[in-house]
Each structure stands twice: as structure tokens, then as C-alpha cells.
Amino acid sequence: MKPNEQNTAEGILFTDMYQLTMAQVYYRTGMQEKLVQFDHYFRSYPDYGTHKAGYCINAGLEWLLDWMNRARFGQSDLDYLRSLKTRTGTQMFAEDFLGWLLKYGDFSALSLWAIPEGRVVHPNEPLTVVRGPLAMAQILETSLLNHLNFQTLIATKAARIREIGRGQILLEFGLRRGHSTGANAGTRAALIGGADFSSNVGISAVLGYPPKGTHAHSMVQLFISLGMSELDAFQAYAEIYPDDCTLLVDTLDTLASGIPNAIKTFEELRRKGHKPVGVRLDSGDLAYLSIQSAIQLDAAGFNDVSIVLSNNLDELVIWQVITQIAQEAPRYGVDADQLIRRLVYGVGTRLITSWGEPALGGVYKLVAVCDQGSWRPAIKISESLSKTPNPGDKRLWRVYDRREKATADLISLDEEDPRQMDTIHLRHPTDHTKSRVLRVNSTLEIEPLLVEILREGQRVYPVQDIEALRHQRQADVDRLDPGVRRIMNPHIYHVSLTQKLWDLKQALIQSSLSGGPNEVA
Amino acid sequence: MKPNEQNTAEGILFTDMYQLTMAQVYYRTGMQEKLVQFDHYFRSYPDYGTHKAGYCINAGLEWLLDWMNRARFGQSDLDYLRSLKTRTGTQMFAEDFLGWLLKYGDFSALSLWAIPEGRVVHPNEPLTVVRGPLAMAQILETSLLNHLNFQTLIATKAARIREIGRGQILLEFGLRRGHSTGANAGTRAALIGGADFSSNVGISAVLGYPPKGTHAHSMVQLFISLGMSELDAFQAYAEIYPDDCTLLVDTLDTLASGIPNAIKTFEELRRKGHKPVGVRLDSGDLAYLSIQSAIQLDAAGFNDVSIVLSNNLDELVIWQVITQIAQEAPRYGVDADQLIRRLVYGVGTRLITSWGEPALGGVYKLVAVCDQGSWRPAIKISESLSKTPNPGDKRLWRVYDRREKATADLISLDEEDPRQMDTIHLRHPTDHTKSRVLRVNSTLEIEPLLVEILREGQRVYPVQDIEALRHQRQADVDRLDPGVRRIMNPHIYHVSLTQKLWDLKQALIQSSLSGGPNEVA
């Protein structure tokens, strides 16, 4: 795509056509500036087939805000919309509507609350709340979902991989298999969720993390094709990067050629006073090869050289590698824990695409409308009760127990503050038979989760750097129950409604079923 | 991401770090301008778990060429590279190398051959061939794979969905679930592969296809929340789009409310001389609801109103819907074929993410090196024989039989032209026991597939518009055997080597195994 085309494709027209056709309906019926509220949330954790997430890591907000800040209808956008024709050849979008878009077609009138990036989040709770004039709040939907769905998906995958990798260094390697330029957003999300560094140079530059990488098989091949050897290739590399020398050892034969040649190269570096960094294994039985490589490296005195693993890794493969090492290493006289602590994971395809579940089903639902100065909750009930959004303006709380573990997230009406209650009736969001009662003085803390980000277009929450988000993520994950953290069959974390919100939802459902307007609020 | 950051992240630094560390090794050893050749190919068809592709649709080249045309090392890129430090705090990239990058760090010296976009392609055949100075040919790898892997993946998925949908109109709806801005590349690929239109406004503007869309559930909800009705919402929409009126009928109750209200709205349009376009079903049992909707619509005389289906569609779901309609419709006195011919498919998440297989494993392998004026084939053999690249400079041919069906793709040495042979010995690329002999005069045509695109950076092949690519794709798919086209357990299409290429590959493998340089060529 050419740069001018990219401006068109990634600006305000980065949206679905129906947002614009609806906006014109709202304009024509005089509703375009009616105040409304939309909630953004997802309905279920990513399900990777053989395993499933028990929590997600929120991400993507900062890039959405950057987009909102610059996206607005300009003359070239309007020229394009003017060119669109109906089936009878007339103009699809009328001039008065286009004039309105030119004047009011930006996001400067919207207010936005959100759970900050890097935080642990769960299904059916509002992650982002948008309030403002109808037409632009509606047009925002597509881009908001695009930005937040994907980054939350990838941050979640990265957190899982980090978890199973016991916190060892995790490198994001996916640029070549990512979805076009979306790979950059994926790298950002991976860093928030659990990756330490990335091979992607450009986005590492933008985010301030040094990019990581050594050499490819092609470098060894090249030397060999020219009549030289793997050892020549290693030595050439080591000469230029004597203090950052990680060598890819599987181009020919890992144990018979790659590791012995790496050791010769490392010995020369050591003689010259340098400290070799690592070897990388990119094929074969990674557990077996790790053990055998460690034996050779240790025998040569390179006990602290890292062993970088790559090749279609994901949480299950890493789990398998660690399990196999734990079982097999002792048979070879190798300390399994010590070996596991020198591993580094390079994860490409299966992190950047969230292998097994390449999309998060986040949605953006109308929950309230302001009519003649008073807010009415909105509800949609055609599908199953579990898909019915929670109506109206709400607040979100996280309840910590005395073990400093998060025990439930609680969605309340805007007017409620559970910190002021004696007991909280936690209602299951859809199953009326399920509830529990919590005594507030038995809790450690009740933390509000939604933060005001934009007040009528003005930023009122500071930009967080990635490092702060990483700390937030780790702190939140540490406060999860181990049952929720496990990568298979996790314990289901409770997201509950207060009794008042539950009552409102039931009343609205009854009212909608009987066909009347929503006048219960 | 902010615009200046985007320039950094999507320019020449849209690559992996190891490309740059290797480039410096090549510069330091005086090899940076040595002529080399890389082949790009994928090793296996996308495997979606329960089903698998029997062919792929090539896509992404034009956007790669746009990127190559503008990506070059500029001062800000060099400033960033200059800032990168080794573990001992010295500069990672030396000034002389940075100076070389500033002077020669673009793709203007590369030549490129490729199979054009829109063509049917198969595993292990060169889709793209890059020849030129080593350092920049190596740096290109990551971006080339990023652009071509993803678009080929999505074009392939779109072709499958079109195939199972019997060529009915296919709408791409995935922007909200795509991977950030990568969704735009996905839409382009979907249009090449089989989608007719997209809901994505911006990329539709760029590519010259009118974007499609009607209204969301939220519009109906809004009217209801304000004390009006679904019918009011439909009528407001119809008034503004009287000749383009497609109504979403499942916000409340599809058969009891949505369809009857749509019919009332359509009757009014008809009275005023307009032709209603369609209804959209986005939840529930789409086959059952299609039949029942058709019965109601037909009874009111709206036999030619389209029924647009959406909600997590993919090739299997569409297959199920069509199968169920074929079985059930007659029981209700509905002509199944007629009903199937009025269906339109809106496919979002599962097209834009290639659900089941969200990445294509395309690779970029060194196959030849020019040393002192003569080309040496390069080979890499550490992994299984099936992963060993075909060495050297090659040509690619498609053989058509007398039925006008493609019967095999044939990879030959550069010097070979199978059109000049009497018989062709088709060797299986890895299994030495498998081969077949083809008499050239029994074939209809032997077509060369690789086209020269760039000659030392100069474009020598015209830009194809999407419409031309769509025609090419359809023509190629039509020339596939039905067994190859089927969506489950497809027949394996033959990709063969000529005897001479087979002999070269075997000789190189033997030579590499015995440790010698590749001097067989």
C-alpha cells in the first residue's frame, strides 16, 4: 500500500460501512448528538482448543487513544463518501450530513473510562466505557474493537507463555508470521503481557526496548557454500560481537558439529577475556538437545551460557520441554532445575497469532441513552441470557481477600459503593440460583478498576510506559489464585453483579419482553 | 502509535534484528555485495484441524513491492542503530557499516521473479525468487515473509469459503477482529481470493470496491430505548436508503418480530416504487431461520429479497447451513436450490484471521551464491529431507492435460525447458521411489509460472488491478481437478522435480554430508 493510500485506510475510514449508514440515519432523525453510553467487554476467555485462559491481560488502549486523537473526517474522506452511490445512482450520503461530518466528525466530544492496560481482566465486565454524542460514539466502535481485541488477545497469550516458562526470559520472534503491520501491535502487547524483548527492530525502537537477535541458518550456509565451514561462520560472528555472542547451532548437526564448534569459538572468546552469551536450538527434540548441549557446554566450563530455544514454541510445547528435562536430565547427571534456569524462549508464530484462538470476541454494546436529560438503560435480549449486556451506567470493583488474592470482580450500579456496605450480595450474572454473600470487613481491599481517561476528549490520565504496565501485569497475576493461573482447566474467577444491578437487569428484560420502553431506571 | 513512530516501525526497520547483525558480519568480511539468490516458498498447505487446503492463492506481492520501493535506511534509522549498545557498552553497529547502510541500504539492486498474485500455488515451489547483493537481500527476508505469508493465507481462506458457498456473494466483515492494521491487508487478500466486497470502508476506498453494510442491533435498541419500536427503526432506515434497504431482523425475535416488521417496511417501499434488497440474520439456527424467513418473504411477494447470513461463519458452518437447507427446505415446501441462490454470506472473524490456521509457514532460503563469477547452489540439510530446499536457480512450470486441468507443477533447472522435451520424468521432491513419466505431446500446455517483476530494482511487470487478479484466481481454480478443490481430504496435487534437478539435489546432499563445499554445479 502506498503512503497516501495508507492515510485513507488507517484514518477515520478505518471503520465498518454500517457505522456511517447508521450515522446518517441518526443525523436525518435529529438524534446524532443524543448522549449515549456504550460498554466494551468480551464474553469469554480465549479457548485454544486443548487449553483455555483463566484470565486476560488488558492491552491496546494507548494506541486506540493515539488513533482517536488523529482520526477525523477530512476533505478527502468526504470526497470519497460523496462518490458512493445508491443502486439507483444517487449519492449515498447527502451533502448536509457530509457537512456535519466535516464539522463534528471527530472524537473530541467523547468521554472514556477504562481499566488500564496491563491489568488482569475477566469476561462480561466493562473494560472500556464510552459516553458521548451518538453518531461519533457509534462510528468509534470498529476501531475500538480492532485495537483492543487484538492487543488483549496477544498480551494474554504472552502472559500464559511466561507463566509456563517459569519467568525465564521470553523473546517475541513473530514478525514474519504476524498479520501484516498488525505484527507491531502484537509485539507491543506481547511486551505488556510477558515478553522481555522482541526481534522486531522498528517497534522495539519505538517502545524503547533493545531488539534481540543473532544470526540465521543462512549465514552458516553461506560460509559453507563458499568453501568455508560452520566454525568459520561462528568465528566471524564472534569476532564482531565478542561480548554478545549467541550462536545458532543446528544448521548441520547440533551435537556433532554445532555445539563443538560453538565451544571452540567460545574458548577463543574466553582467552581474549570475553564472556560468551548463548547457543540457540531451532529444531529437533529441544529437551534432549538442551540436556546434551548443557553436558558439552558444562564440560568445557561454559555453565552459564544460555540455551535459547525456538521452533513453534507455545505454552504446551514449553511445558512439554520442561517436563521432559525434569524427567530426563537426572539420568544424564544434569541438574534439571539448573538447566531450566538457563533456558531462554524465542516464541514466534504461536505468540503473534495467538495460535489456537486468533481472535478475542470483544463487543461494544449500547447500555444507556440520555433522553430529555435523564439516562435510560438500554438492553438487548434476542439471544441467550448469557449474551444479554448488563444495562446502564456501572462501576467495577475488585475484591481482595485476606490472603491478598483477588476473590471476585463486582459490577455495581454507578450510585453504589461496596466499600460503604456491610455485606455484599454477589449475584452470578446470568444464573439466578447462584450467589454468595461477602462480609466487607472480611476483605482486605475493594479496589475500583475503571479509571477516567478522556473527559470530553481531553486526556485526564497520564500515559503509562510499557515498563510500568509490565509491573502492573505481574502484580495482578501474582494476586490471582493459583487455580485461576493454571494453563489447563483453570478455576473460573467470579465476576458478579450487585443485587441492585441484578434487579435492574431482570426488570429490563421483563419490560423488553412485554414490548414496553425501558422505564424502570 | 503516533504517526512519527509509525514511520519508524513500518519502514526499513520492519525487520528482525538478526538481519542487521548478519549484515554487519557480511560487511566486515567483505561479502555484503556478493550476489546471492533466495527462494521464498511454503512447505505445506494450511491445515485447519478438521479440514485442510489442497491449494493456495498467491497474494501480497504488490504491497511488498510498495514497501520495497519506499523502505531505505535514513538518518533517523541510523541514529537509532547507533544508539544500540553491546553488553560492554560499546556501539553495536560501527560507523563504517552505518555509512554503508546510508549509501547502499535500499532495495534498488535487487532483482525479483514471482508467481503473480491471484494464481493457484502449491508447497515447495518457488513463489518468489530474490537475487542481488547479499546484505540487502538478507535484510529483505522478514518483510517479504510478513507481506506474503499473511495475504496468501487469507486469499486461500477466502477461496475456500467462496467455493463452499457455491459462488454466492461473499462479504468480508472482519475489521473489528483483525490483527490491528493488518486487517486492511487481510481485506485486500480476501478480495483477491474470493470475497466480493468488504465492510471495511478505508481499504475499500483504496482498492475501488464499494464498501457494504446496513445497520447494527444498536440502532434497533436505540429506537426501543427511546420508546419507539423495531418497526420505527426499520422505517427510518428505509426512508433514507429506499433502494439499498437491507434490514437486520434478529434484534428482538427474528420470525415473530424482525421478519414481519421488515415485510411491512418493504411493502411501503414497494408502494413507493422501490425495490427492497435484503434481510440479515446474525444469530440462531441460520438454516432454519433462512427457510422460515423465505416462507414469510415469499408469501408477501418478496421472492427476490436476499437473505444475508452472518455470525461466526466459515467454510464448515456454511457447508452445514447449505446441507441443512437442502434437507429441510422441501419439508416446508421451499425450493432449496432457489433459497441457496438468494443467500449472501458475511464472514468476519474466521476469514480475517484464517481461523484454525492463523499463519502460513512461508520461508526464505538461500539457494545459490555467486563466487568469482560462477553460481554455486547452496543447500541446508540439518532437518528432514522434506525440509531441504531445492538448490540453485530454477524455473517453474504448470502442466495442463487434455481436460484443460492442471495435472502437475514442475520445478526444473534454469537451463531446462520441458516444452522442448519429448518425455518428462516427474520426480517426487523427497521420496525417491515415487515418479511418473509424462509424454509432452499428451499435454495441452506447459505454462511457465515465474514472471520477472524487478530487474535490478526497476519494475518490469505492470501493476495488476484487483479485478484482474480475481479473474486469474477464478480461472486457475476452475482448472483444478475437483478432487484438489474439495475442502476436506483434498487430493494431493503433484509438485515434481525434473530428473536433472533431482540429481543435483542428491549430489549436493551427499557432498554436504561428506563435509565438502558444494562444487557439483
Image (tube, coloured by chain):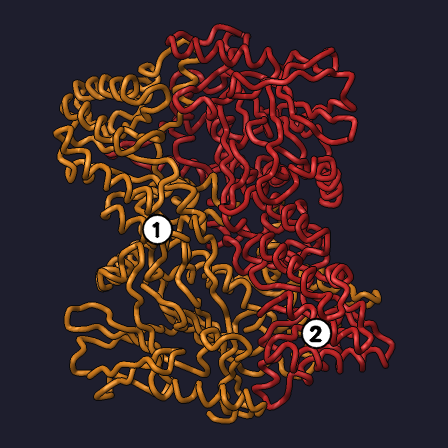
Chain colours: A orange, B red
Q: Which residue is mark 2?
A: A97
Residue at 68% over, 70% down: A21
Q: Chain of mark 2?
A: A
Query: How busy is the neighbourhood of tag 2: few (under 14 within 10 Å), some, or many (20 plus)?
Result: some
Q: Position of residue A23 (x, y in %)?
A: 64, 74
Query: How busy is the neighbourhood of tag 1: few (under 14 within 10 Å), some, or many (20 plus)?
Result: many
Q: Chain of mark 1?
A: A
Q: Position of residue B408 (x, y in %)?
A: 66, 26
Position above or below: B305 against B477: below
| Camera-side residue of A49 and B153 | A49
Q: Quadrant of residue B488?
A: top right
| Residue B96 seen in the figure | no
Q: Amino acid at mark 2?
A: Phe
Q: Amino acid at mark 1?
A: Ala
- Marks 2 and 1, how far apart at CA: 44 Å
Q: Which residue is mark 1?
A: A158
Position above or below: A66 against A22: above
| Residue A484 seen in the figure | yes
Residues marked 2 and 1, same chain: yes
